[in-house]
Image (spheres, rainbow, N blue to C red):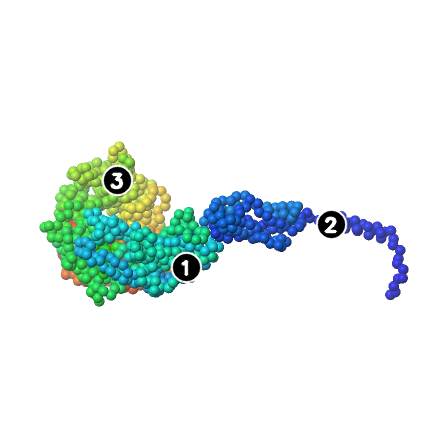
Amino acid sequence: MRAELFPRPVTALQVSIVLSLTLIAAGCKTEKDPDQPTILGIPPGVAYIGVEYYYNFGAYGGEDILDYSLTNAPSWLALEDTSNKARQGIIMRGVPGLNGGARGDADLGKLTNINLVSTDGQMAGSVPFDIEVKYNVLSLEADTFTEGKSPSIPDTNRERCELPDLETPGEHSFTVNTYDANGAVTASPLDLTLPTRPVFVKVLLDRPSVTRVAVAFELISDYNPQSCDPGFTAPHQRCDHGRANTGDAIPGTDIVALGSGSEALLEDIPYLTYETDPAGAYPGVYTGGVVTFEPGITECYIRLEVVDDSFPEPTEVAQLRLTEVRSGLAAVGPTNEGARTNLVIDDNEPEVHLETVKGGTRDALNVGDSRTYIARLTGERDVEIRAKLGHTEDSSARLNTEFGTDLPNDELVFPMGTDEVSFTVTVEDPASYFNAGPDDRFILLGLDTLYQLGRENYARADNEDILRVSINELTSPLTVGSSVGFVATDVAVGHGGKMFVAGYDSTDSDRVFVKIYDQKGNLLQSLSVSAPGDQLAAPDPVVGVARREVVQNNIRTIRYELVVAYTAEGPASGTTGVGGKDVVSSLYWYDEASNAGEYVETWTTRTGTAADDIVRSAGINPASGFVVIAGETEGEWPDQTSAGGFDSFLQRIDSLPDGNTFAPTLAWTRQAGSAADDRVAGARATGLSPILFGSAMGSVNGESSLGGEDVYFYSAASREGELNVRQRGTDADEQVVDGIVEGTTLWLLGNGSNRYSVEQGDEDSLSLASQPGSSLSGFLLGYTLDGEIVRSFNLNDEDDLSSEQFSALTGFFGDLIAGGVTDGDFTGTAGISGSETGIVARVSLVPEDEPDAETAAYRNEWRFQINTAGSDVAKLANYRDDEVVALTRIGADWTILLLSPEGTLLTP
């Protein structure tokens, strides 16, 4: 290839193309206008006195280097002075109360319409914002202290002061009054020098201050030695430790800022100084001081000392108060008007627990009787400890009036090495015992704290561990009827301890009565339920009582009510027969103005179907007052369907206003059953939805039959809607005879020939299982209201030789009491066997698998057997969780027997 020495001539076409390309290139050029300067972000809306306010802005836009300025800004706020304005961010900072003339609290308040302006010389952008300046608040936090115990300081993410040493004990000396047996101050006070335990209170500063902050503190208390109980004047024990001062810790005695001998024993804390009481109430006692926060610190500690004394005391309270900021910029409390916290001090003296010999805290004792109880001492001690017994304020029986002890001066003495002491309680002899009230008196026995306060080496009391002993005045069996005469069928306990015994008179056309007795066994009223001319046949009345709050004439008052229901075949005065056997229900209320107080009739009504209807349970809803009737029907209630044979029915009867009284209205009746005859054992009237329970041989309301006789239960709240029947059990026969609802568990009592257990299944599910037994026995099955099995118990003699048949169930102090009959030795120690005798058993609902003996809850289980042939327990009731009331047949007589919470027969 060779080079051309001369260029070729340029043609017109080439020139034209070059010009065109140039013009096109000029026409395609795009050039964006510069953005207006824009500031990124919004500054914080809150600043704090003495705390640095800081914000780093970003910005973009403009054609040149951006400049920044503030307008309408407070004097303490400024932009950082930099020499390089080309960078993209700029810092705004300041310290309210310190910058701009050190204005202090004058900088508090809200500042509005502050503007940060950015400009490149031609264009500008701005961000308006507000700042509210608040106090940097000091506050206090304290946990509960315990004498003799050092607390630990938990971790924190705050910048904090050096942690104080809380393990080394201090020492404090002080003087206290001593008292004689009557509480008068003796001539010789007691000088004490005792160890102390350091404790701490957190002092928190809301934000880190740029300056050192020193704040003063002081101990205060409501204690006043001049505040005396009525009838006493200072100085006296009933002033120093009177009711007005109970629970108030005493600075200088219970707690100090620094013990009198602690300065040489405890470490010096650089940020903490102590001062003696400035008011002079506690001369020479260190009750306050100053705590200092260095810049950046937000958590410091005030070390106090709790005196480890040997006086029994209740939980006591003092207060720690921040009084003023001595230096720096901070506020004491949100409004700078002070900050305080309660200092709660628990006592560590040995504690006395009073128990029955079996370990319980509840008993019943007959008038004139004695029983031994146990006092247990727990806690560390190195001296002999005393404890003076006394009745508590709520006790209706008084020590040395209605009852006494065998202790000199009623004082328990625990020598070193002895932590259990027995003592005897004796109730006043019946000849001198007096109780005008309807209820039995009860003893609430604890420690005489008013006597013990301020006395060394006495034990403290557990306020929740009081021994309760009911004083029973009915000390022999109460005969209420006989098989030839008044046949008792049911029992309930109502207000004032009244015992309502329902039954019928077999010598007077089976006329229905309710006999009302007081706790002394006196017949208060014989209530005629049916008319003299009515011809009844074994009406088997049932009874229920309720205490209700009602509004009468715009005044809230208590109304006591009684419902009695019985089965009537044929005419019953004041009612109209429906067909076959009907249910007659009568409601009564307690009228204090009638014969000095008696039950009077509210209404009577008769309900039924064209066939036979038999009542099994009657109750009153304590909230709304409606009556709940449950039973068995061979007919068909309106809008209901018969399944065949005897079905169950559950009905609600309302009491509607009718002038000055009330009239009964049948609100609804629900019916459910199987093709076979179904049993109804009872019903629960409480709650919005009454519950019926029983047992059936077939499928109830479409539920699956498990084989033999099954448990079933359901609830209803209206005449409409599908009944949700729960049919449960095993392939054995579970014949239900009674039941109660305790909390959310339905407990069903029944009889059969099997032993039951609850087994763990997959995914924590439980199932009921049964194994054949050798004899008839009772059982208890616990179900949730949704039908899930919870627990089961077997009520059988230990050797499974005799037959037990149960008929009654009641709740008692969180447990269950069951009653019935045996033909053998149910207790294992019965004095009679081979004949039918009445039995009662308490079943504890406390779990058996408690972790160990020291923490296990008290399980109170016992068995009782009547030592008389031809007896059985038919019905049970509960009096105040103090006594079990058993309606018992003994031979031809119907008798009320009473049992204590621990199974002692009170009516031998």
Circle 1 SS class: loop
The residue depicted at 82 percent of the width and 52 percent of the height is 18
Mark linked to residue 730: none
Q: Amino acid at mark 3?
A: Thr
Mark 2 or mark 1: whose residue is earlier in sequence: 2
- Of badges 2 and 1, the one in the foreground is 1
- Please say if 771 is above or below 533: below
Q: Amino acid at mark 1?
A: Tyr
Residue that mark 1 sits on: 271
Residue that mark 3 sits on: 557
Residue that mark 2 sits on: 29
Per the model, the C-alpha gap separating discs 3 and 1 is 62 Å
Query: Picture coordinates of residue 727 (x, y %)?
Result: 33, 52
Question: From this viewpoint, is residue 282 visible?
Answer: yes
- Please say if 724 is above or below 150: above
Query: Picture coordinates of residue 473 (x, y %)?
Result: 14, 50
The residue depicted at 23 percent of the width and 37 percent of the height is 602
**Picture quarter with the C terminus:** bottom left
